[in-house]
Image: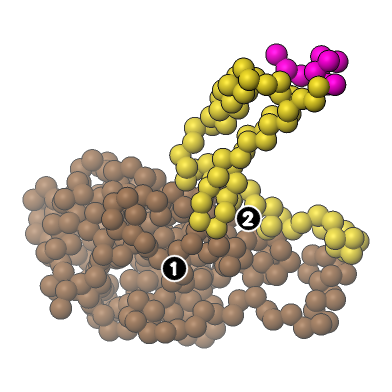
Chain colours: A yellow, B brown
Amino acid sequence: MSWLDRLLGKNETSGQTAKQRLQMVLIHDRADLPPGLLEVIKDDIIAVIAKHTAIDTAKVEVHLEQDTNENRLVAEIPLLTARARKNGAGGK
Amino acid sequence: MSAQVLTVTSGKGGVGKTTVTANLASALAMLGKRVTAIDGDIGLRNLDVVMGLENRIVYDLVDVVEGRCRLRQAMIKDKRQAELYLIPAAQTRDKTAVSPSDMVLICDQLREEMDYIVIDSPAGIERGFRNAVAPADKVLIVTNPEVSAVRDADRIIGLIEAEEKGPGQLILNRVKPAMVSRGDMLSVEDVLDILAVELLGVIPEDERILVASNQGLPLVMHGVNGASAGEAFRNVARRLEGEDVPFLELVQKQTFMSRLKSFMGGNS
């Protein structure tokens, strides 16, 4: 990384990248989650919630977060506003 | 007194298990301890060449297990140290020739006569790994500051805890201080953050390790003149003996000028 990047505070070092990537990989390894499971969970969550209210299915996100001593499954499910519903965006 | 069984393992291959085993066994013997090193990598034996004992093999571990010789006959005495022995692996057989209970039995026979038994585990998490870990009193996990090696180390830590051999201690091998300084290598602190395990040793990358293995003379036996990896291995041996030895200062403390230089140069 060039001194200009450093001056501008851009670009993390490759060592930092390595640490972050490892932390993400290990969350999955330690929880013993098969690849693709988060996608399956996401689809199921969408199906359940869509039965009760309109949601923006394209923007639903399910990911893992690591705290000091626990792993957490985090789902972000944006609800559609009445106006968006009228315009026919998202939803099933 | 009864020997302590140390198993050196890593999951990933090529991180330096055999080098660590050879140097650690030698360093412990140099402290006046009675030590037997066992090569657990059946079918791919290597500890014999790294220790320079390959020409003296008559019997091996599988010969002992299958009753073709007594345990003593398979122990090659290292002539350079008073009480250092090697039990080589068989080269023409596979891991299934030995079972975890065979390993426990062999180590139990040796315990009374030794202070340390150091087992070199094969790479992987299958039979050979389970053989090597079965008799362990303490598991030493070798890793490098590199994503794939650290990931495998994490898996191994989980497995040895499941086998109730945990928590294990870490030897971080092949650290390049210059790369750590400029942020292009995981630091000791990064690795400890990720693995949350007790640190036993930090071994710097050292060309003399290859020279030592070319010659079949473990680096710790090369004398004390500034061999930094050798020094690090001797420190590991002393820590195992219960001494409180500070870790080598690998990354130079940065002065204002060196900081400015590395800031401007990017790569220095």
Residue in view at x 38 percent, y 81 percent: B238
Could you tell me residue B18's position as x and y percent? 40, 60
Q: Amino acid at mark 2?
A: Lys
Residue in view at x 36 percent, y 61 percent: B167
Q: Is the residue B240 above or below the residue B43 in the image?
A: below
Residue for badge 2: A19
In the figure, residue B235 lies in which quadrant?
bottom left
Q: Is the residue A44 above or below the residue B136 in the image?
A: above
Could you tell me residue B211's position as x and y percent? 50, 68
Of residues A20 and B138, the one nearer the viewer is: A20
**Where is the C terminus of chain B found, in terms of image quarters?**
bottom right
Residue for badge 1: B198
Of residues A75 and A32, the one nearer the viewer is: A75
Give SS at disc 1. Answer: strand
Give SS at disc 2. Answer: helix
Q: Amino acid at mark 1?
A: Glu
Q: Are marks 2 and 1 on the same chain?
A: no
Q: Is the residue B264 above or below the residue B39 in the image?
A: below
Task: Give left or right: position of B67 versus A54.
Answer: left
